[in-house]
Amino acid sequence: MDDTPIDPPRSVPDTSRLLIAIAGVPASGKTVFATRLVHTLNSLLPAHPSQSRAVLVGLDGWHLTRAQLDAMDDPKRAHDRRGIHWTFDAPAYVDFVARLRDPVQRDALIYAPFFDHSLKDPTPDAVVIGPSHRIVVIEGLYTMLDIDPWRRAAAQIDERWWVQIDPARAKTRLIKRHVQTGVAEDMDEAVWRAENNDEDNGNFISRNLFDVTHTIQSVDDPAYSI
């Protein structure tokens, strides 16, 4: 990422959480950036030896399961397009963000799912947001999507950061990642998925963004993998 200073986020009441959404087209580097951001925040804002102030939540946890995709009218298309907005449980995600906006209560916990790449399905309640987590960073493709019901969640986010990248560089990263992670069996399938699913999703997001508060330029950093 670039080193452009980011304006301090707006203040929130003592009983509230600061919510930061990080989005970008597939392979823009948003996950790496979000992970580094949370690590940095926790190093700067210690709360307690056994607690942290910031927590990372991935939107991928709200992927529909493979069984749910199998039950759709066109299962093959659903699996081929897995990652498009209608293959997520958007209402459940919107409800999750609404709970984050509730006043912070002592000993009250909020749970989020986590996408297990080894299972290729979400694991429910795998991420715990406790009272000490006053900053919640949510990263994912549709965290600032301006269509219903997604916009209802985006409107409740305090900061919405868009990670900008050259489309050709994103495609190169995608193809490499699909092969390395086993999403595609070979290079031909990786290219097909990049061109027929990921690029379409990225273009759709770019055309339907909800009130971006800051744009961050993605750059290749040899010290980190994307």
Image (cartoon, rainbow, N blue to C red):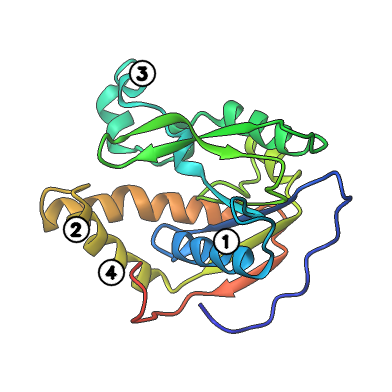
Label whose residue precedes the other's in the sequence (1 or 3): 1
Mark 4 highlights which residue? Answer: 172
Q: Which residue is mark 2?
A: 180
Amino acid type, callout 1: Val
The answer to whether the residues at label 1 and label 4 have Cβ atoms under 8 Å apart is: no
Horizontal side of 94 relative to 16 (left or right) equals left
- For the residues labelled 2 and 3, the Cα–Cα distance comes to 29 Å
**Tag 1, which secondary structure?**
helix
Residue 165 vs 18, above or below: the answer is: below
Labels 1 and 3 touching (C-beta < 8 A): no
Residue on which the image places disc 3: 72
For marks 2 and 4, give the CA distance.
Answer: 13 Å
Q: N-terminal of the two: label 1 or label 2? A: 1
Q: Nearer the viewer, residue 25 or 60?
A: 60
The residue under label 1 is 38
The CA distance from mark 3 to mark 4 is: 31 Å
* Residue at 29% over, 55% down: 195
**Marks 1 and 2, how far apart at CA:** 25 Å
Dot 2 falls on a residue whose secondary structure is helix
Among numbered discs 2 and 4, the one appearing first in the sequence: 4
181 left or right of 12?
left
The residue depicted at 44 percent of the width and 49 percent of the height is: 201
Residue 129 percent across, percent down from the top left: 62, 40
Task: First in sequence, mark 2 or 3: give its number.
Answer: 3
Label 2 sits on what residue type?
A: Gln
- Asked if the residue under mark 4 is in contact with the one under mark 3, i.e. CB atoms within 8 Å, the reply is no
Give the class, few, some or many, for how many residues have Cα within 10 Å of label 4's Cα (few <14, many ≥20): few
